Image: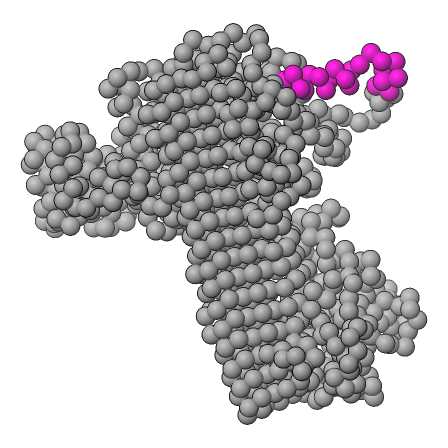
Amino acid sequence: GIDGAGQYGSEWLWRGPDASRNGQATWWARYDRFQQGFATFGGGNVRVSAGRDAVNVEAAAASNGYLKRDPVTGNPAGLQRQGGGDLSLTAGRDIAGGFVLGDAGTLRVRSGRDITAPVDVPGALQALHGDSKVDIEARNTAVVGLATSFGLISGAPQAFSGTVQTTLTGVASGASLRMVAAAGDLNYRGVATTDFAGVTANPHSDTTGVDKIIPDSAVFAAPGGSVNVGPVVQVSGVGTRLSILARQDATVSTVTVAGTDPRQATPTLIDSVTATALASTPFSAGATPLDQGGRDPVRIVAGDGDIASTDAMNIVKPIRLLAGRDVSVAQTITVQHQAADELSLIQAGRDVVFTGYSPDPTSFKVYGPGNLVTIAGRNIELNTSGGFGALGNRENAALPSGSATLTLLAGVALGRGDYAAASSWYFDLLGGTGIAAHGPDLAAQLIALQAGQALPGLGSSAATAFKSAPIADQITQTRALVGQAGLDAAVLADAQRRSAPGTAVDLATATSNFTALTDADKGKVLGAALANAWTRGVPLPQQRATVLAMVTAQGLVNTHAAALLSFVAAQTGQAGLDLPQSLAAFQGLAPERQLVFTNQVLLGEIRSAGRVASALSGTDRDAAYARAYDALAVVFPDAGTDGSLQMGSSQLRSYQNSAINVLTPRGGVNVGDLASSTTPKSASALGIVTGAGGDISMAVRDNVDVNQSRVFTVGKGDLLIWSSDGNIDAGRGAKTVTGAPPPVFRFVNGNFVIDTSGSYSGSGIAVLDASSTLDLYAPVGEINAGDAGIKSLGNAFLGAVRFVGADNLSVSGVSVGAPPPASTGGDTAGLANAGQAASTAATRINSDDSDEEKERKRRKRLNLILDFLGFGDGSGKP
C-alpha cells in the first residue's frame, strides 16, 4: 500500500511512446510490479465493502490502451482502450484515507458517516481515474486529497531514459466528477498524498500543476454544510462544467478553467513545459484563442453563508458567485466573455468586499463583451483593490470588439422585492410607473373580470366613468376590486417610500398620510393597488395584449419598444422577432438579465425627467422630477436595507466603448480618496472612467462624493448622476493629479495599433467629448464643484437647490439649469483635460528633434498602419 510499498499507481500503470506505432501514446499495466492492494488488469469490476471502517484501502480497475495507426499513412486512427471496469469502495461508518483507480466505468466511493484523513493515515483519499464517472459521497463530512487522471501523476519510475515523456493527457476526456458531503462539510485539498513509507518528501509531487486538472464536468457539493476547494484546473477537449455548491460557506483557492484544448481529447504525451502551460494559461493566444466548448458559467454558491475567494481565479467563461451573506475577494478574478449575450454575476445578500491590496489596475477583469453585474444587499467595498475593469479585446484580438457593461447595485435585494414590480407592471416597455399609470383601464378590466365578461379595450366607457368619478368614489371602487388588504398594502408602501430612511411606518400612520395627499397622488396609490390586482387576476396573454395596446397609444412618446427589440435579439440570438414575441422572450429571461434592460429604461426615465425639470421652476419643476422619483419607486418599491458603494482607492473602468452603471437606491457613492490608502496609487488606477467611449450613469439616494478621485467619460459618452435626497460633490482633487498610463500595443486584423485611450489628467467630474452630455441632478440638495471642478466639453443639464463653486463649473456647449458659467478659457482648477494630455503626447511624437524626425520617416516606409486611439488636437474634440 501507500504506507508500505510506497506505490501510487504510476509505478505499475506505465505510459509512454510506442515505437511500433510511430511513437504514439500508449499505457499498460505492469502487474509484475503491482504491490498496491486489490486490482484487475485485463478487465473486470472491483468491489470492496466494510461493515464498519475502511482504513487506507487501495483498489484499482486498470485499463490499457493505445492510439491505432493508419496502415498506409501511419498517422493516428483512433483510440483502442481495453480492460477497466467499475470500482466500488463502501464503508458502513468511515473511510480513512485510501487510494482508488478506475477507468472505463464508474468509480464509486460511499461512507455511512465520514471520509476522513486522520493523522495516522498517510494522506487523504486519492482518486485517480480514466474515462470514468467518479462519484464520491459521505453521509456526513468528507476530506478528499485529489481526484485527477492517472496519466497526469508524475514521478513514475519507469524503464525509460529521463528524456522520455510520461505525462499523458487525453485519457479522461469523458470523465465526470461528483463529490458530496451530504450533511457536513466537504474539504477538497487538491494535493497528492504527502507521505510514502515514512518518507516526508513525496516522490510524486508535481511542479507543473498538471495534476490539479479535474474532469471536464465537476460538482463539489455540501447541501448541509460548507465547501472548501483547493486548487483546481479544468482543461477540456470538448467543454467544461464546474459547480461548487454549499448550504453554508464556500471557500475556494486557485481556480483555473481553460479553453478547449485538443490535447485533452486524444491521448498525447507532453513534456513539463507543455504541462505547465496547460495547467496555468487559460487565456490562449495561440491558433485557437477562443474557447470552442460549452459556455455554461462556473457556479459558486453559498446559500446561507459566505463565499471567500482566497487566491486567483482565471476562467475562460462567465461566472456566477451567489452568496446568502458576503462575497469576499482577496486576489484577482478574471473571466472571458465571447459574445454579447454572456453575463457574469456576483450577488451577495449582504456585502461584496475586496479585501486585498492590488497593484494591478483591475482586480476583477472581464475580457470581451456582454455584462458584469454585481449586486449587494448592503455595501460594495472595493478598498485598496484594483476594482472592476472591462478590457474588451485589448489582450485577445480574436474576441469581438467592445468591452462589457459594468453594473453595480448596492442596497438591492434581487428576488426579494426589487425589480419584481417593475417586471410585473411592464415598466420595461412602458416606462414611468408602467401599467399603474393606466389605473382607469385596469379598473375597467377588473370589473369585467369579476362579472365574467370579456375584457374591454383601452378607453372604454367603464374606464372613462372611473376616471371622471370623484376621488372618494375611486377609492371605494378600488377597495371593492382589490380588497381592503390590497388597498392597505399600496397605502403602506407609498407611506414607507415617502418616509425618512430607516423609519418604520405602521398602517394607521400610513392611512392618515394617505388622506392628506393630493388627489393626483392618491390616484397614483390607487393605480399601484389596481396594478397588483390586475397582474394577479388577468391571464398573461391578455395582459400582453393590453400592454401592447398601451404602447401603441403612447406612440412616439414610447422610446423603449425599439430598445427592447434590440436587447432581446442580442440576448437570445433571435433576430427578426416582433414586439409581442420579444416581450414574451424578455419575460423568459433570468432576472439578472432582465435588470440590465430595466436599468437602461430607469436611467432613461431619470434623464428625461431631469432635463425637463432643469428648465422649470417651482411646482412645475417638482412635478417634472416626480417622474424620476416614481420610476425609482417602481423598480425599488420598499425601504429595504441601506447600502452604498465605497470605492476606497480603487476604480471602475471600461476600456472599449461600454457603459458603467451604478445604482444605490438606499445609499450613496464614495468614489474614492487618494489619502485612503497607505500605498498610494497612480491616478490612472482610480475613479470611475470610460476610457474609450461609453456612458457613466449613477442613481443614488444619498450623496455622491468624488473626493480626490474622478468620474470621467473620456471618449464619446454621456454622464448622468442623480441623487434623490443628497448632494453631488465633485471633490477636492489636487491640481497636480494626473493619469497617463502607458500605451497598449497590439495587432488587430493585421494592423499594428497603439491604444492611448487611457491618456487623461485631473480630478472631479468631466465629460471630455464635445458630442456628449453631462446630466447632474440633486433635486433637494446641492451640486458642489469643489476644488476639482465640473466640466463638460458638450452640453450640460443641471438641477439642484443650491450650486456651490460655480467658478469651477465649465460647459463648452449649451448649459441648462446652471448658474452663469465661468470662462472656459482659463484654469479649470484641476479638471481633466484629456485633449491636452493627448496633444502633449502627439507633440512629442511629432517633435522636430532630428533623431526623432529621422525615425518617423523611417517608420513611414514600414508597411504598417498605425492607429492612435485617444489623441486629440488640444481642443478636447474627437
On the image, the x and y values in percent for residue 618 come to 26, 17
Closer to us: 698 or 782? 782
The answer to whether 220 is drawn above or below residue 401 in the figure is below
Residue 727: in sight, yes or no?
yes
Residue 580: in sight, yes or no?
no
Query: Is 276 left, or right, of 673 in this rendering?
Result: right
User: From the image, which quarter does the C terminus lie in?
Assistant: top right
Q: Residue at x 65, y 32 (%)?
A: 682
Q: Which residues are magenta?
A: 834-857
Q: Residue at x 66, y 79 (%)?
A: 119
Report the coloring of the rendering. one colour
The answer to whether 702 is drawn above or below residue 534 in the figure is above
- Which quarter of the figure has residue 58? bottom right
- Which quarter of the figure has residue 49? bottom right
Residue, far right: 161
Residue 813 magenta-highlighted: no
Closer to us: 656 or 807? 807
User: From the image, which quarter does the N terminus lie in?
Assistant: bottom right
Please identify the dominant SS of the magenta region: helix
The answer to whether 403 is drawn above or below residue 483 in the figure is above
On the image, the x and y values in percent for residue 470 come to 7, 31
Query: Is 759 left, or right, of 20 in this rendering?
Result: left
Residue 849 magenta-highlighted: yes
Query: Is 309 left, or right, of 795 in this rendering?
Result: right
> Total label count?
0
